[in-house]
Image (tube, helix red, strand yellow):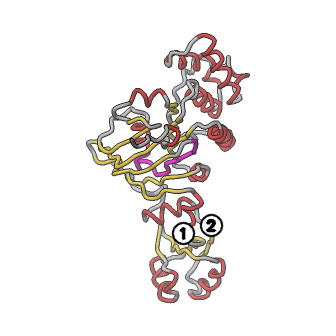
Amino acid sequence: MTAQPSEEGLPAVQAQGVEYSYPGGRALAGLDFRVARGEIYGFLGPNGGGKTTLFRLLATLLPLQRGTLTVLGADLVRQAREVRRHLGVVFQNPSLDLQLSVAENLTHHGWLYGLSGRDLATRIDRQLERFGLTDRRDQRARELSGGLRRRTEIAKALLHDPRLLLLDEPSTGLDPAARRDLWDALTALRQDGVTVLLTTHFMEEGDRCDRLALLDRGRLVAEGTPAVLKEEIGGDVVTVTGPDPQALARDLAARFPELAPTVRDGSVRLERERAHEWVARLVEALPGRIDAVTVARPTLEDVFLHRTGHRLYGGEDAA
């Protein structure tokens, strides 16, 4: 008899051929990915790229149309109730009752999971301490800052000790300090063995993930650690601006065939190792025709542009 793999050896999430369509068109087009237990895994992409649809599928709010999705070893279609028991979900739009205190919000959430009495009180105290909310327990949610509300949302989602935390655009509306606090909390959760899966359109948030999937128009266009994804650029990114970018690109290609320049968003773009050594050569090659040359290390947006041909913040929305 073949031994069955232990539950701990299974991935937190595994998707094969996941597709989803709305009446207006296809939102997800055959996604394949695997999320290991205890990692922070992010989906980065523009609005309309399919992130929210995927989030709703994983949260069991939409029925899976095609493909397979397993969460903590349970099939999302046949074992949805089992999946929900182990999920903590934080939506992009706030779900707090602003008229209730922080502790009252957690109490009502605990009741939904059948928690009560001393057990519920202990869990609430633990989560309030975990997220630095103990001194806010009796404060109404409407009086909290955006960062404190988000921390309360996460504390509420973790009240029943889920093993997978889903967050949809968790940094939306937060200032930089609140974002840092949020990520300190997520890092601590990973150390406690909780798997975190989030959607985002912020590049700096993608850089903080252990691994990342880039989504565009319902397709997974790249996957890996942020560092490995950026390594595929093969050097620095050089941007050249001038009155006639098309002519600049054509003449640079004729003068330096090895550069392979392209025109993106009204600028000439090329990728080279030791790119700073090319700045003077480019300006001298086309005197008076170049307004500026910038050299930068590749970003996740550069990877997205490299894979899709359009920018993360300038792509067309999917259906």
> Residue 25: which disc?
none
Mark nearer the N terminus (2 vs 1): 1
Position in image of residue 310 (x %, y %): 44, 62
Between 11 and 260, the residue placed more toward the observer is 11
Instruction: Tell me the residue at 51%/89% (across/down).
Output: 255
In the image, 83: left or right of 139?
left
Q: Amino acid at mark 2?
A: Arg
Give the residue furthest to the front.
1
> Pointers 2 and 1 in contact (CB under 8 A)?
no
Is residue 111 placed above or below 58 in the rendered structure? above
Q: Amino acid at mark 1?
A: Ile
Instruction: Tell me the residue at 49%/30% (across/down).
Output: 86
Q: Quadrant of residue 298?
A: bottom right
Give the residue furthest to the top.
117
Q: Is residue 205 visible?
A: yes
Crowding near the residue tagged with mark 1, few <14, some 14–19, many ≥20 C-alpha atoms within 10 Å: many
Q: Which residue is mark 2?
A: 297
Instruction: Tell me the residue at 59%/87% (across/down).
Output: 287
In the image, 176: left or right of 223?
right
Give the residue furthest to the left.
23
Q: Which residue is mark 1?
A: 233
Between 283 and 17, the residue placed more toward the observer is 17
Q: Quadrant of residue 134?
A: top right
Between 22 and 111, the residue placed more toward the observer is 111
Crowding near the residue tagged with mark 2, few <14, some 14–19, many ≥20 C-alpha atoms within 10 Å: some
In the image, 3: left or right of 236?
left
Q: Is residue 208 magenta?
A: no
Q: Is residue 41 magenta?
A: yes
